[in-house]
Image (spheres, rainbow, N blue to C red):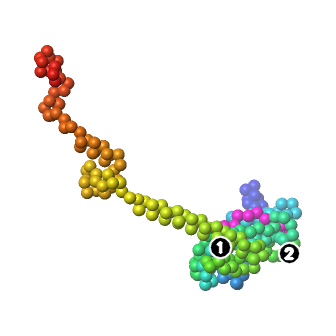
Amino acid sequence: MTLALLALGATAQAQVAPWQDPAQAISFETAPETGLTVASKDLSETRIYPRGTLAVIDLRCRLTLENRGAKPVRGVTLAVESQQSAAGGRASVAAPSLHAARGETFSVNLNLRLVRPLPGVAGPLVAVSVDGVLHDDMTFAGPNRLESQRKLTLLEAEARAAIASACAWLSTRVATICNKPLSPSSSASPSNPSCKRVWPAADARWHVQRTRTPRRSSSRCSTWPAPRSNSSQARRW
């Protein structure tokens, strides 16, 4: 019985159609003008299975791209297509706020579900291509079929504005702290007269204590409270 089940499983695995193999069913393309090349791709978690008359593609891929161009890359948009006419067959993935100089690599995670009719001819089910690249000087390169230039430019402008606002606030705070004048009455501290730190309340209490009337001798203070006695000296004390 065990041998029969193993043989059945091996037969079913051997009957898997070629279009269900992610390595053959998914293709990756990069336009020459973008200056990007595919360094590596991980399709180990991608699943392709039939459902009725449709093929469902659960695309789970980590795509690593390398910048071969002369300008640093600040953003990229990937176009993912399984069919162009029906719903559920097109998608896009944007990766803004990058900084990949020439020769450096960066990764883009694809986590999509696509559908298309069951394939009748051999060929890839899904095509992943670079729709556009935004460079460090805000120039754009690529087919721009999905209006990637406008989206990437807007995201990069918002990111730069947020960074500039944060830097301005931080510089204002630092200037305020560094240029804060010292209090006239706090030029010296009780423990160190040459110290220039601010002693707002403690310094005032210290000056008040210095101007008080000196206490009585320690010999009399040590006898408090006074012992009960009927002598006039004890009553005066």
Residue under label 1: 75
Does residue 222 show up magenta in the picture?
no
| Mark 1: few/some/many CA within 10 Å (<14, 14-19, 20+) | many
From which residue to which does the magenta span run?
Answer: 109-118
Nearest-to-viewer mark from 2 and 1: 1
Q: Is residue 216 visible?
A: yes
Dot 2 lies on which element?
Answer: loop
Q: Quadrant of the N terminus?
A: bottom right
Q: Is residue 10 visible?
A: no
Residue displayed at 71% across by 68% down: 93
Q: Quadrant of residue 157?
A: bottom right
Residue under label 2: 121
The percent position of residue 222, horizontal first and vertical second, equals 16, 30
Q: Quadrant of the C terminus?
A: top left
**Residue situated furthest top in the rendering:** 230
Nearer-N-terminus badge (2/1):
1
Residue displayed at 76% across by 73% down: 147
Q: Is residue 159 above or below residue 133?
A: above
Does residue 3 appear to the left or right of 86 in the view shown? left
- Give, as a three-letter code, the residue at label 1: Gly
- Give, as a three-letter code, the residue at label 2: Val
Q: Which mark is residue 192?
A: none
| Mark 2: few/some/many CA within 10 Å (<14, 14-19, 20+) | few
What is the CA distance from the residue labelled 2 to the residue labelled 1? 36 Å
The percent position of residue 232, horizontal first and vertical second, equals 12, 18
Say which of 100 and 223 sits in front: 223
Residue displayed at 16% across by 33% down: 216
Q: Quadrant of residue 111?
A: bottom right
